[in-house]
């Protein structure tokens, strides 16, 4: 056999590596160097693992090349070196992770002054990520000895690759003990507080964005680990710190206090707050404690909170308590028009535009309205926030991002009951607050009247030849939410009572609207997945007695048998009943075609003799012979056979 002789084709690199005086750059110019490296080419690895070559590859990743230098020095050599060092070859990982001199050289990239080269930063982050994953003990021990690691990380947090490095440090460390050790170390370094300090008007927007994204990743990652790692030796310190009331208060202070207010700080701060208000799936789903939240598009919807551990409840409560005194700032943000130029759109002029800060404020206030804290709802009712949301909804006719958030908020308020109602733990103040929200929505906000007026206004505009209002789709969903919540749900009785308290004329308008335009719109929006007269399936064809009585011609019997075989369903008993049984073979012998088949075989197939010469056996046995006249007259045909006339 071929493999007995170990005949492996030698590669071009093997020949090249035998040459004396071969330089690293000459080797990196070869196209198949990375493939050979991943294939663990011994000669290639011996060359690359030489100390001077490892040092040269690390230098190409960490030292800024001259701006007027060769493009290979600026792009190709660093890129190929990064691919080699991150090829996940055990010998390279051991050599790089076990040499502290190389680690110091690699770490020196962070210590460079000024802004980092984004391309080199991505190479640096990728190499460090592989080392953190494969050599976690050595790398964590090395980084802990560096007192300036966290400050350097935060100094360059505006570079996305450095933000990725922080995330790798939180996610790529294997083993719960070591991971918990890393979290504790970073918490002692006050990484959370320092990231919040980066979300400040004095910093640039890239630092705002990456710091906020890092905080959001910490929250989501920590909560996921709380779910999957039930035997964690101690609670997650980073998450506990981030959910503390004083931590959230510091974030809110950066957003609203100071001489100038930054839109970027407001947007990034709201993103962190929305992440903190996101629900956490319970450990009960994985055999742990009970109680969980549900969310849709950033909205906080509390289901059963019974059984939440003390740390989780305290942290969530701290977030809500810190948010309550700042609700008036977010409400005021909705009332203030952004200082932006008039925006020209395809349908007209926006003067002024809604703006990203106000859109994010709508998302946050919608989450606060559905939060399990009665004090937040009471504060928002006093501020008349729901009316403001509806005003913005109808003012910005074609902003569907805004429409979806307002519609979702109102639908949640109408369809959900007070927190704890499903578990029998809803106290009287909580129930009263929830009822006050529903009453405020129908009485103070005049939701039913505004839906009717907006619908009629749209009909008038379209009748005059105008375009359909952009909020009509969400308005339809909002109206359906009112109808469905009146028919069934925790608020059905209260909504029915409030509707009966409306003037008689408005009640009649609403009933006419529900049974007329709304019902017609729902009918048009209902799309049938199949036509009214679907085509019958093959199984129905088999049951049709007309097809059972149909007699196929004998010459098509084999084709029909094959088609029947194809229609069989593959079941567990299919193998046992595959093909024909003995009785069926016996019945087939009575078929006149079976004799004809035997005649054809005898005429066409020649039995070979072992002593017969090879030359006679090549062609003699396959000579074409004419069929008997009887066979041709019967019209028998063998698929794939060629007959001579």
Image (tube, rainbow, N blue to C red):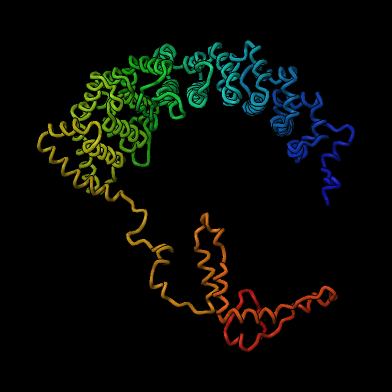
422 to the left or right of 583: left
In this view, the residue farthest toward the right is: 20
Q: Is 434 placed above or below 526 here?
A: above
Along the line of sight, the residue nearer the viewer: 380 or 586? 586
Q: Residue at x 21, y 33 (%)?
A: 492
Along the line of sight, the residue nearer the viewer: 211 or 626? 626
Q: Quadrant of residue 598?
A: bottom right
Along the line of sight, the residue nearer the viewer: 153 or 480? 480
Coordinates of residue 477 in the picture (x, y in percent):
29, 40
Q: Is residue 118 visible?
A: yes
Q: Residue at x 34, y 32 (%)?
A: 405
341 to the left or right of 225: left
Coordinates of residue 60 in the picture (x, y in percent):
73, 26
Q: Is 543 placed above or below 63 here?
A: below
Q: Is 1 placed above or below 295 here?
A: below
In this view, the residue farthest toward the left is: 504
Q: Is 605 placed above or below 491 here?
A: below
Along the line of sight, the residue nearer the viewer: 463 or 360? 360
In this view, the residue farthest toward the bottom is: 629
Q: Is residue 59 visible?
A: no
Q: Residue at x 54, y 75 (%)?
A: 587
Coordinates of residue 300 in the picture (x, y in percent):
36, 27
Coordinates of residue 291 in the picture (x, y in percent):
38, 25
Quadrant position of the C terminus in the picture: bottom right
The mark tally for this picture is: 0
Q: Quadrant of residue 332?
A: top left
């Amino acid at each position: 056999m071929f493999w007995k002789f170990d005949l492996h084709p030698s590669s071009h690199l093997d020949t090249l590596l035998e040459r004396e005086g071969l330089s690293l750059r000459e080797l990196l110019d070869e196209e198949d160097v990375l493939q050979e490296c991943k294939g663990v080419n011994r000669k290639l690895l011996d060359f690359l693992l030489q100390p001077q070559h490892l040092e040269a590859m690390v230098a190409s990743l960490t030292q800024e090349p001259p701006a007027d230098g060769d493009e290979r020095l600026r792009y190709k050599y660093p890129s190929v070196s990064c691919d080699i060092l991150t090829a996940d070859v055990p010998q390279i990982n051991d050599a790089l992770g076990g040499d502290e001199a190389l680690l110091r050289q690699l770490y020196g990239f962070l210590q460079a002054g000024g802004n980092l080269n984004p391309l080199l930063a991505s190479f640096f982050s990728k190499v460090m990520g592989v080392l953190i994953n494969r050599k976690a003990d050595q790398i964590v021990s090395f980084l802990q000895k560096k007192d300036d690691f966290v400050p350097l990380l935060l100094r360059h947090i505006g570079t996305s690759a450095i933000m990725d490095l922080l995330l790798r440090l939180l996610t790529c460390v294997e083993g719960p003990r070591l991971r918990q050790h890393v979290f504790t170390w970073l918490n002692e370094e006050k990484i959370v507080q320092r990231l919040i300090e980066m979300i400040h008007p004095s910093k640039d927007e890239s630092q705002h964005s990456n710091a906020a994204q890092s905080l959001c990743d910490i929250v989501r990652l920590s909560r996921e680990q709380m779910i999957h790692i039930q035997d964690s030796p101690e609670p997650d310190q980073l998450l506990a710190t981030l959910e503390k009331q004083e931590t959230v208060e510091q974030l809110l202070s950066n957003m609203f206090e100071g001489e100038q207010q930054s839109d970027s700080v407001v947007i990034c701060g709201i993103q962190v707050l929305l992440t903190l208000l996101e629900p956490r799936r319970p450990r009960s789903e994985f055999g742990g404690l009970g109680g969980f939240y549900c969310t849709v598009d950033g909205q906080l919807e509390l289901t059963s909170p019974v059984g939440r551990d003390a740390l989780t409840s305290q942290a969530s409560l701290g977030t809500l308590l810190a948010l309550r005194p700042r609700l008036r700032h977010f409400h005021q943000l909705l009332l203030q028009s952004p200082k932006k130029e008039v925006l020209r759109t395809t349908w007209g002029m926006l003067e002024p535009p809604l703006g990203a800060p106000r859109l994010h404020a709508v998302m946050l206030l919608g989450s606060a309205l559905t939060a399990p804290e009665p004090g937040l709802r009471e504060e928002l009712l006093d501020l008349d926030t729901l009316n403001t949301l509806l005003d913005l909804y109808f003012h910005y006719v074609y902003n569907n991002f805004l429409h979806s958030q307002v519609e979702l908020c109102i639908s949640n308020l109408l369809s959900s009951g007070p927190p704890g109602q499903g578990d029998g733990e809803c106290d009287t103040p909580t129930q009263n607050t929830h009822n006050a929200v529903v009453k405020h929505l129908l009485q103070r906000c005049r939701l039913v009247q505004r839906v009717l007026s907006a619908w009629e206004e749209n009909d008038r505009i379209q009748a005059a030849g105008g375009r359909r209002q952009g909020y009509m789709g969400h308005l339809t969903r909002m109206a359906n939410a009112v109808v469905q919540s009146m028919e069934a749900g925790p608020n059905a009785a209260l909504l029915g009572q409030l509707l009966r308290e409306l003037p008689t004329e408005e009640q009649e308008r609403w009933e006419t609207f529900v049974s007329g335009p709304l019902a017609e719109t729902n009918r048009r929006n209902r799309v049938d997945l199949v036509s009214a007269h679907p085509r019958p399936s093959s199984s129905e064809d088999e049951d049709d007695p007309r097809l059972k009585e149909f007699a196929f011609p004998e010459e098509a019997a084999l084709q029909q048998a094959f088609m029947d075989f194809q229609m069989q369903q593959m079941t567990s008993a299919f193998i046992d009943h595959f093909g024909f049984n003995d009785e069926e073979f016996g019945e087939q012998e009575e078929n006149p075609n079976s004799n004809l088949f035997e005649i054809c075989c005898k005429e066409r197939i020649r039995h070979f003799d072992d002593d017969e010469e090879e030359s006679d056996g090549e062609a003699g046995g396959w000579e074409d012979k004419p069929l008997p006249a009887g066979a041709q007259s019967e019209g028998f045909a063998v698929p794939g056979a060629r007959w001579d006339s």
